[in-house]
Image (spheres, rainbow, N blue to C red):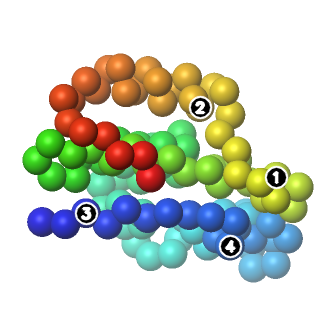
Amino acid sequence: TSTIAPVLGNHDVDSRRIASKHPLHMARFLREGFPFSDDDLSNGFLGQGFCLVPAGPGLELVMVNTIVDHHDELTAKRGAFKAERLESLRTALSASRSGRTRVAV
């Protein structure tokens, strides 16, 4: 079994709102089940800005979505991960304590 780890970037944000009123529309609706077939993982990645993905025996991917707060041209110029999101990630990592090796993506 393999795990696909999507990485979103500035090129996935329609910061000028040319195609949609929502700058992240293309990234959110790239295909059904994107970025993960598991709705909880997708909701965490797209909504909270991160999720923890089991990726095989002894491995967990810490998926960080740095475009989660891109809303316009100014915020799309640089990736960000707000302090509140960082604290939520810390809490999730502490609660998980899976014993797996973690790799941040």
Name the residue type under label 1.
Answer: Thr
Residue 11 — which label? Answer: 4
- The three-letter amino acid code for the residue at tag 4 is His
- Decide: few, some or many residues near mark 3? Use Cα within 10 Å; few <14, some 14-19, many ≥20: few
**Residue tagged 2:** 85
Q: Secondary structure at mark 1?
A: helix
Amino acid beneath label 2: Arg
Identify the element where label 4 is drawn. Answer: helix
Place of residue 77 in the rendered image (x, y in percent of width and height, measured from the top left): 82, 59
The answer to whether residue 54 shows anywhere in this view is: yes
Label drawn at residue 3:
3
Residue 75's disc is 1
Query: As drawn, is 42 to the left or to the right of 1?
Result: right
Say which label, 2 or 1, has the lower sequence index. Answer: 1
Looking at the rendered structure, the kind of residue marked 3 is Thr
Residue 4 in percent (x, y) is at 32, 66
How many other residues sit within 10 Å of disc 2, few (<14), some (14-19) or many (≥20)?
A: some
Q: Quadrant of the N terminus?
A: bottom left
Q: Is residue 76 above or below residue 29?
A: above
Tell me what residue is drawn at x 56 percent, y 64 percent: 8
Residue under the image location 28 percent in, 26 percent down: 96
Residue 22 image-quadrant placement: bottom right
Label 4 and label 1: CA atoms lie apart by 13 Å
Q: How many other residues sit within 10 Å of disc 1, few (<14), some (14-19) or many (≥20)? A: some
